[in-house]
Amino acid sequence: GENVGLHLPTLSVQEGDNSIINCAYSNSASDYFIWYKQESGKGPQFIIDIRSNMDKRQGQRVTVLLNKTVKHLSLQIAATQPGDSAVYFCAEQTGANNLFFGTGTRLTVIP
Amino acid sequence: GAVVSQHPSRVICKSGTSVKIECRSLDFQATTMFWYRQFPKKSLMLMATSNEGSKATYEQGVEKDKFLINHASLTLSTLTVTSAHPEDSSFYICSARGDWNGYTFGSGTRLTVV
């Protein structure tokens, strides 16, 4: 599969602080990226996506930034809450169908 | 919203037996379904891609005779782990893609082979 990886395997933040989760990808031809949240024993849950013709996209409390020059993707979570504790994956789409996942970052929110 | 139902959520089977996992899109037609495998504290690894009515496309290193995939309708895909062994124990997750090009994931199946 594609080499989609994350810089930090774990991240701990205080409740109310902002979180930034990073992702590096290797295929410069990829044109679609998704961030997923996965809670223990559950399937991935869609958070936000971005296409390669955009640099930034905002959702509710979340922002995704895409830097195609350095092939870097980040997820910013504002005012992190305990319910945000989970593993976060970036995923990269190559070709028409296949979606490949990065290694994941475990976010722990400290009350 | 789009919902994918995966069943069973947990299964324990004896070594040498086969296990079938079902993935259903409940409120949309899934033109393509995907099967992933996830080891503890690891990422999701794509096993195969299936399109309704055609043979599945397997990723490199995935044994197609070991992991049988059937996508008989636009709402159902099944993964059968044949002659299961303890090393097949894992978390298996399906996802379905509808005509809006979005991906919806099932809740996963925890397979334990004893």
Image (tube, coloured by chain):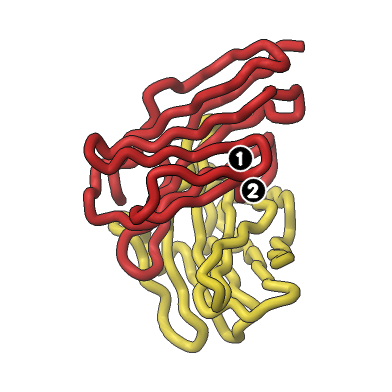
Per the rendering, the mark at residue A37 is 1
Q: Are marks 2 and 1 in contact (CB under 8 Å)?
A: yes
Q: Residue at x 39, y 62 (%)?
A: A98
Image colour for chain B is yellow
Quarter in which the C terminus of chain A is drawn: top right
Q: Earlier in the sequence, mark 2 or mark 1?
A: 1
Image colour for chain A is red
Q: Residue at x 55, y 78 (%)?
A: B99
The vertical placement of B30 against A55, above or below, is below
Q: Can you see residue A91?
A: yes
Per the rendering, the mark at residue A45 is 2
Name the chain letter of the residue that bears numbered label 1. Answer: A
Q: Amino acid at mark 2?
A: Gln
Left or right: residue B15 versus residue B3 is: left
Q: Can you see residue B13?
A: no
Q: Amino acid at mark 1?
A: Lys
- Residue A83, how many percent across, how many down? 75, 29
Per the rendering, the mark at residue B81 is none
